Image (cartoon, rainbow, N blue to C red):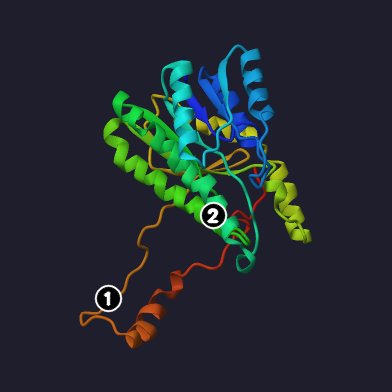
Amino acid sequence: MLDGKVVIVTGAGRGIGRDIALMMAAYGGRVVVNDLGGAADGDGTDAAPAEDVVAEIVAGGGEAVANFGNVAKAQDAEAMYAQAMDSFGAVDVVVNNAGILRDTIFHKMSHHAWQSVLDVHLNGSFNMAKAVAGQFREQGSGCFVNFTSTSGLIGNFGQANYSAAKMGIVGLSKSLALDMSRFNVRSNCIAPFAWSRLIGTIPANTEAEAARVERIKAMTPAKIAPLCVSLAAPDCDVTGQIFCIRKNEIFLMSQPRPIRSVHRDDGWTPESVTEHALPALKADFYDLDRSGDIFTWDPI
């Protein structure tokens, strides 16, 4: 499906990214394995995770190179593109998977915790897209696979920074799909349910939270990779969509559209909004749901 295609996978040293890189290579892709090697909160560096994945790919007969750049830095993203061109002469697919977590309840969230998470997830996805956009335009093809989260799509406690970044990625992905469709460039989002070291940092202080974590442990990172490979295949024509994966389930997620309206010929006043508009719309208001309130059944 990917014979000879060049794939950049960010955050590919461990977890979801690692399994994506391995499967991309197994299906013929030549892979740039990017991983800063930082801790779950983004601190520190370590070359071993990316190097180990490259070694595994090469041992299996594939082609891969390691990259240790920080996607939050535009110059590192540009260097990653340059490395792909130097090593393989092309870039065909970018998987924006790299991420960190710095969870805390909002009134205790620091400016640094907010900015650092947005820098890696949202700015990192932009930096990578920007670095390769000219190449995609020139060659008349390309594919972005961007990672969002149900924490943004639906909601979660203590993740205002992460949720905001992940919803920003949804908007970025749709804009890439719209702006670059004329160049045969596709862009889609995936919201994964999978056990990873990032998920392992989520507190499990109650019986319900502990049970939720145990359910997530059954959803291995390898379950995410097949959809990524399918979306990356050159004959795939899917673009502008949001998918969610839970173990063996693939969901197509909704996108905001009008669901109910009210109008008055003479316009609105604060009083008429209060007395008419809001009560008329109330039946379709959304509850303060979290992901677990929507996905209430065990993974299949």
Mark 2 vs mark 1: in front:
2
Q: Residue at horizontal 50%, vertical 34%?
A: 76
Check disc 1: other Cα within 10 Å, few if <14, some if 14-19, many if 20+: few
Secondary structure at numbered mark 1 = loop
Question: 218 left or right of 227?
Answer: right
Locate the C terminus and report the quarter of the image it occupies. top right
Q: Is residue 234 above or below residue 116?
A: above
Residue 89: x, y in percent?
42, 17
Residue 189 seen by the camera = no
> Which residue does the image show at 40% across and 46% down from the upper left?
172
Question: What amino acid is at disc 2?
Answer: Gln
The vertical placement of 119 against 66, above or below, is below
Which residue is nearer to you in this view: 99 or 261? 99
The residue at 65%/52% (across/down) is: 297
Camera-nearest residue between 232 and 292:
232
| Residue ranking furthest to the left | 265
Q: Which mark is residue 263?
A: 1
- Element at label 2: helix
Q: Is residue 52 above or below residue 15?
A: above
Q: Residue at x 67, y 49 (%)?
A: 298
Image coordinates of residue 7 in percent, x first then y, are 48, 25
- Decide: few, some or many residues near mark 2? Use Cα within 10 Å; few <14, some 14-19, many ≥20: some
Q: Earlier in the sequence, mark 2 or mark 1?
A: 2
Image coords of residue 37 (percent x, y): 65, 35
Q: Position of residue 86 (x, y in %)?
A: 45, 18
How far, Cα to Cα, is label 2 from label 1?
40 Å
Residue type at mark 1: give it: His
Left or right: 31 as drawn, with respect to 235: right
Residue matched to label 2: 115
